[in-house]
Structures are given as C-alpha cells and as structure tokens.
Image (cartoon, rainbow, N blue to C red):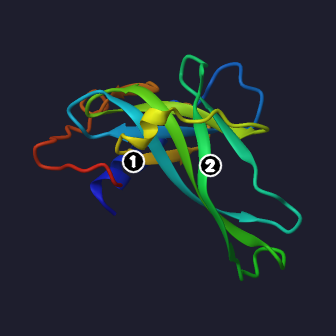
Amino acid sequence: MNEAAAILNALAEQVDTRFEGTQNDYRALIVLNFSEETYTGPAVLRVAMPLKPGRTPRKASAWDVAGKRIPCEIRDSRFEPLNNPAFPEGTRLWRFELWLWVEGVPAQGYATYRSEWSDDELPLPEAAATRTPLYTVKEALPHAGTLPKIGTLQQAGFGYNSTQHGGTDG
C-alpha cells in the first residue's frame, strides 16, 4: 500500500463523514491534496461495482460541506463479465470514473464531499480539461469521527512532508 492509500484509509476512518439534513443514501468522498498549494480542479474516484441483471447504470451528484451542489460526472463507463458465485448469474462489473470539481482543498490537506445517485449530472467546467486531476480520492460510509470534514494533514496528525513525496496519482 502506498502512502496516499494509507493516509486516505486513515482519514476515511477518522473524519466525521456525516452530513446533516441528508435523507438519501449517500457516500462521503475524501479528497487528498499533497501539493503545497490549495487545489481547485477535478478529482477522480475510480470505481468497480457489481451491477445485477436488469439494473442499469445511474448518474451521480455531489455536494460540498456547505451543501452546495458541485459539478460531478461519470466518465469512462464500461462493463466486464463478473463470474463470481456470490452474485446472481448475469451480474456485470461496472467500472467507471467519478469526476468531481472541487474547490479550495487545503494545501497538504483534505476535504470531504457527499455523493449520491441522481437523475441528472452537473457537468464539469471546461477548465477541467486543462487541469491535472487528483486521483487521491476515497469513498467512505457515513459515520461519526474525530476529525473535521476539511483540514490539513498536520492538523490531522500525519506530519506529512511534501519535500519527501509527491505526485497526484494515488
């Protein structure tokens, strides 16, 4: 496991991923920014999930911690056979990338977003094509935690040193 994955796993356990007033089934998305500058741009979660027979792919929406809906799209959607006796015959593996437009992710820090299935998507701005995306994103179930939804790695107790590490692909 690389350092980004280890930090994301720890954040997923420690960050309070509950969003008040939300009634739908949702997931929290924790975006990690290793750079020394606040990040605004696309963040990408790579997903592989079983899709049972008769089910069709859905669209997704996302919100920031203030409850503002943010641009979010499913891209690179594809299917693969899933030959696993734990799932009904005909189940397919749905692979896709969930792209979100994030703003103000702290330098050497993280921010948490809420995502859920929806009937429509809010497209990413054209600037998404010119920015290098962050692939350091982790999905988490809603739960109480000791860390706030937005913070720095140092505040979270990770003592991260960017001069020793780098990169945006996790």
Specify the label residue 74 is tagged with. Answer: 2
Compare residues 126 and 117 and report the one nearer the observer. Answer: 126
Q: Earlier in the sequence, mark 2 or mark 1?
A: 2
Compare residues 76 and 107 and report the one nearer the observer. Answer: 76
Q: Is residue 31 left or right of residue 100?
A: left
- Three-letter code, disc 1: Thr
Residue at left 51%, top 32%? 125
Task: List x then y, in percent, for residue 46.
Answer: 52, 56
Compare residues 33 and 122 and report the one nearer the observer. Answer: 122
Task: List x then y, in percent, for residue 73.
Answer: 61, 43
Determine which quarter of the picture holds residue 156: top left
Q: Is residue 160 visible?
A: yes
Q: Tag 2's secondary structure?
A: strand
Outermost residue, left direction?
163
Where does the N terminus fall, quadrant-wise?
bottom left
What residue does disc 1 label? 136
Depth check, mark 2 against mark 1: the one in front is 2
